[in-house]
Amino acid sequence: MAWIGKTDLRAPAEGELVGLGPIAQAIEQRPFDEAFLLSDYEYELVQPYLRWLRGRSSVRIEALAEKLSGPTQFGEIYEAAVRGIEHALGERRGKTELAMHLSPGTPAMAAVWIILGKTRFPAELIESSREHGVRTASVPFDLSAEFLPDLLRAPDERLRKISGAEPPETPEFVDVIHKSRVMARLVERARRVAIRNVPVLIEGESGTGKEMLARAIHRASPRRDRTFIAVNCGAIPADLVESELFGHEKGAFTGAVQQRKGHFEAADGGTLFLDELGELPGPAQVKLLRAIQEGEVVRLGSSKSTKVDVRIVAATNRTLTEEIASGRFREDLFYRLAVAVLQIPPLRERSGDLGVLIDHLLGQVNLELGAEPGFKEKKLSAGARNLLLSHPWPGNVRELLNTLRRAAIWSDAAVISSEDVREALLPVSPSASKQEVLGRPLGGGLNLPDLLKEVARHYLGRAIDEAHGNKTKAAELVGLPSYQTLSNWLAKYEVQS
């Protein structure tokens, strides 16, 4: 499938200047059976070109006339392209392989081919040039049919927000990269609570980005111009927790050679982020509760209280209700902090986020390493990307970022290969992996279609990688009857080939 472009029409008369043109070049270099060419040009201009093209090849060529009001009318181009594809496929949809040529025609025409080739009509996207010949186009993003309706829902969404008096979009949350609905709802709740002055409790597995969300809440709050102090409660020795949080007087204990403010006083007027809250020992929990209730702290070695105005944002990777039941966490402190509770889902439950996170974090890695001598900006091969998309990521976003860092450092080439990624991935316990798939509790957000998709993407990606893109061999590796069936599965589960 291709639109006839100006360079194609000039090829018969000006071959030495423009070459064969994209279409003729593709037909001569690739083993196509048929070519369907859409055209908005007048009949008199197209017919000489078609005669010339048919004289050079045994490929069956059919021209499809389409009248456009302009070369950038996306709606008209989209409808014309769909008509052309449906005509070309007829009853053969799912039984033949389709290719869409991006080079001839306008950028708008190429954009429509990309949208259709990634959604309604899975196809190989190709491009051609005199310098590099004909090759598969590298499209640096995933586009899924499940996301396209969001484009159409945007006007309705704006109206719904206006009528519901929802808080406006805020740039403070731009670092929370997401596409999934579950993360969109989380960010919306975070924006709502950011403007309040209530404590926030953020729950989530390690590596999900709890501190990033806490900083975004601070930046979107009225306290944005005041101090944000992050404290890792799990990294403070038990005998120094009270001193770190509430300060001490000179001589309060051995080694206290001078007076010191604690984190509460240092954060006065701003936000205090208490990470790994569940690691606090019991005595510190009692004093923390009092500081929150009374709005004041007492330094170790002093009997005088100091007023503080601090907003608490706490985070934990533990389930605090279970900690309460086991006697390791105070119930009264929990309810003081759990005024607004935000639960960050693990990466495996953020459907649609992994692809955009890979692109964003790889860009971050390129910036980090860009100043190193001889560093080449990295891109991912299709096989490498499929491996990343199929990994369960028990360490969540932090594990993904560190994996990309390792792969970029170990790769000498500009393109990170599947081998580079495989060596950079941390091993996942087989028993843990089995438990992850087969041992999940029923209810509570279990989504069987998403689980099946996760398994299918894992094995399809591995098969394509091990078969080096040979679909027939890949189909054999996963027990599918033919490459056509494999192509359907790849399209259904959005696996790049």
Image (spheres, rainbow, N blue to C red):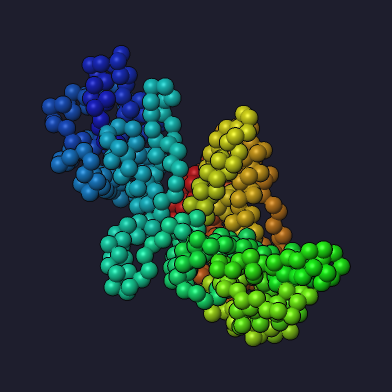
Q: Is residue 230 left or right of residue 68?
A: right
Q: Is residue 53 left or right of residue 485?
A: left
Total numbered circles: 0
At which x and y percent is residue 133? 42, 25
Q: Is residue 486 left or right of residue 388?
A: left
At horizontal 87% and vertical 68% (from top left) the residue drawn is 254
At horizontal 32% and vertical 74% (from top left) the residue drawn is 164
Residue positioned most to the right = 254
At horizontal 64% and vertical 54% (from top left) the residue drawn is 399
| 253 w.r.t. 51: above or below | below
At horizontal 30% and vertical 15% (from top left) the residue drawn is 17
> In front here: 469 or 423?
423
- Quarter containing the N terminus: top left
Q: Is residue 452 visible?
A: no
Where residue 144 sits, quadrant-wise, is bottom left
> In front here: 79 or 364?
364
At which x and y percent is residue 447? 51, 70
> In front here: 363 or 118?
363
At which x and y percent is residue 61? 27, 32
At which x and y percent is residue 124? 41, 41
Q: Is residue 305 visible?
A: yes
